[in-house]
Image: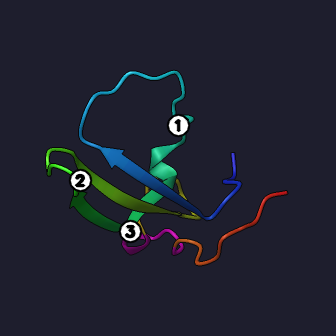
Amino acid sequence: MPALCGRIHLTLIERDVEGDTLFPEYAAAEWREVAREAGVSAADGALRFSFVTLGACSGQPGLLPSEGAATCFQQDIDLP
């Protein structure tokens, strides 16, 4: 299935938390990490997190651009 967007921005929290809302599943092999910024909470420094940007890759799923797949899209797509 083709991606509906060219980029995913995730915040990964290094802690298990309870909740009723989860990020939907996606085909991880069709995305590659293009940026990551790690941080810790300013309040007490106890919560570690990372801001991660994933870019959609075209070509064969699972291949990075250096392995023959086309490069990731460089544009965001606005959905209605």
Q: Which residues are magenta?
A: 65-71
Label 2 and label 3: CA atoms lie apart by 37 Å
The kind of secondary structure element at disc 2 is loop
What amino acid is found at the position of numbered circle 2 in the picture?
Answer: Ser
Residue in the picture at 21% in, 52% down: 43
What amino acid is found at the position of numbered circle 3 in the picture?
Answer: Glu
Residue under label 3: 67
Residue furthest to the left in view is 45
Judge depth for marks 1 and 3 and give the one in front.
1
Q: Quadrant of residue 59?
A: bottom right
Residue furthest to the front in view is 43
Residue under label 2: 41
The kind of secondary structure element at disc 1 is loop
In the rendered view, would you say 70 is above or below 59? below
Of mark 2 and mark 3, the one earlier in the sequence is: 2
In the rendered view, would you say 7 is above or below 26? below
Judge depth for marks 2 and 3 and give the one in front.
2
Query: Residue 19, position in %: x, y?
Result: 45, 23
Residue under label 1: 23
Query: Residue 74, position in %: x, y?
Result: 58, 78
